[in-house]
Image: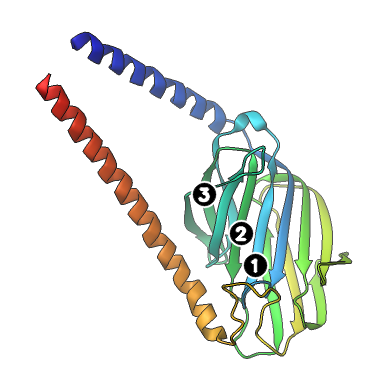
């Protein structure tokens, strides 16, 4: 019995040492992104603005690893995922902390170098036909190629990108998209996005199940704000459940050891 316990202990110890060494090796590397796309889609599927960060880190050997992204303060995250080589989404638990009055930091562990992060902001004044968006993209890693894609909402009038300049327009699925590429963007760089347009309704471009197509726009805005608190409770419940399961397994193992 003692010999078996020693064997189990040594196996666990070697596994812990191996994982610790692998984590130390990964954490010591400076992570850089090869290609990253930032989608800025006002009133795409809600009365707010949908942002999407997706791309790929350059060093495959650095993963699994933990990293972070900067997003506008108060954003509500929809998805925080890593993509396998086959394109399967592996959604991850994440932590959010405020780094200054205008930005939050999202930290998560990625099993693969591909990432996908989507979130919503709510910058528009309720009831105003003229919408103005002023938000910045802040890079948390160096990026070789950063592609910004701004979508003009359906039924928008006088749509204008004030800054930055130099966007090329094209039509995709019946909507105008404005695209611009930034090369060799350093870590911590700020790309200030400023645009304006006139829209006489509060219906989003996409008619999907959580879009406020019924005209209950104030309720939709509230639901997005409440969603952040709801997700916090979900993650707390998951963590509590995991802790309870570990305690139960420990009790079972200890009970069997006492019988032996």
The residue under the point 23% across, 39% down is 247
Write down the quadrant of residue 244 in the picture: top left
Measured as percent of width and height from the top left, residue 164 is found at 81, 66
Q: Name the residue under label 2.
A: 118
How far apart are the two marked residues, 2 and 3, measured between alpha carbons? 14 Å
- Residue at the image point whose x is 66% and y is 59% from the top: 52
Mark whose residue sits in front, 2 or 3: 2
Neighbour tally class for label 1: few under 14, some 14-19, many 20 plus, Cα within 10 Å: many
Q: In this view, does 251 lie to the left or right of 19?
A: left
Describe the element under mark 2 as helix, strand or loop: strand
Residues tagged 1 and 2 counted as in contact (Cβ below 8 A): yes
Q: Which residue lies furthest to the left in this view?
A: 259
Residue 125, image x, y percentages: 61, 85
Left of 116 or right of it: where is 193? Answer: right
Q: Which of marks 1 and 2 is nearer the N terminus?
A: 1
Q: How many marks?
A: 3
* Of the image marks 2 and 3, the number of the one nearer the N terminus: 3
At mark 1, the secondary structure is: strand
Q: Residue at x 83, y 62 (%)?
A: 179
Image mark for residue 50 = 1
As measured in the structure, the alpha-carbon distance from the residue carrying label 1 to the one carrying label 2 is 7 Å
């Amino acid at each position: 019995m003692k010999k078996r316990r020693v064997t189990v202990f040594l196996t666990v110890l070697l596994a812990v040492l191996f994982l610790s060494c692998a984590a130390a090796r990964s954490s010591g590397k400076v992570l850089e992104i090869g290609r990253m796309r930032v989608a800025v889609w006002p009133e795409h599927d809600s009365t707010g603005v949908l942002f999407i960060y997706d791309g790929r880190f350059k060093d495959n050997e650095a993963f699994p690893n933990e990293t972070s992204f900067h997003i506008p303060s108060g954003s509500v995250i929809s998805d925080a995922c890593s993509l396998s080589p086959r394109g399967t989404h592996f959604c991850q638990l994440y932590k959010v902390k405020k780094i200054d009055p205008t930005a939050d930091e999202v930290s998560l562990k990625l099993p693969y170098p591909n990432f996908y992060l989507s979130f919503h902001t709510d910058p528009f004044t309720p009831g105003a036909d003229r919408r103005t968006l002023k938000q910045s993209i802040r890079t948390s890693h160096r990026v070789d190629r950063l592609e910004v894609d701004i979508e003009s909402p359906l039924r928008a009038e006088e749509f204008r990108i004030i800054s930055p300049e130099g966007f090329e327009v094209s039509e995709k699925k019946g909507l105008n998209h404005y695209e611009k590429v930034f090369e060799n963007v350093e870590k911590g760089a700020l790309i200030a996005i400023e645009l304006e347009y006139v829209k006489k309704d509060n219906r989003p471009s996409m008619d999907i199940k959580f879009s406020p197509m019924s005209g209950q726009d104030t309720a939709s805005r509230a639901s997005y704000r409440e969603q952040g608190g709801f997700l916090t409770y979900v993650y707390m419940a998951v963590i509590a459940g995991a802790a309870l399961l570990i305690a139960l397994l420990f009790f079972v193992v200890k009970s069997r050891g006492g019988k032996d």
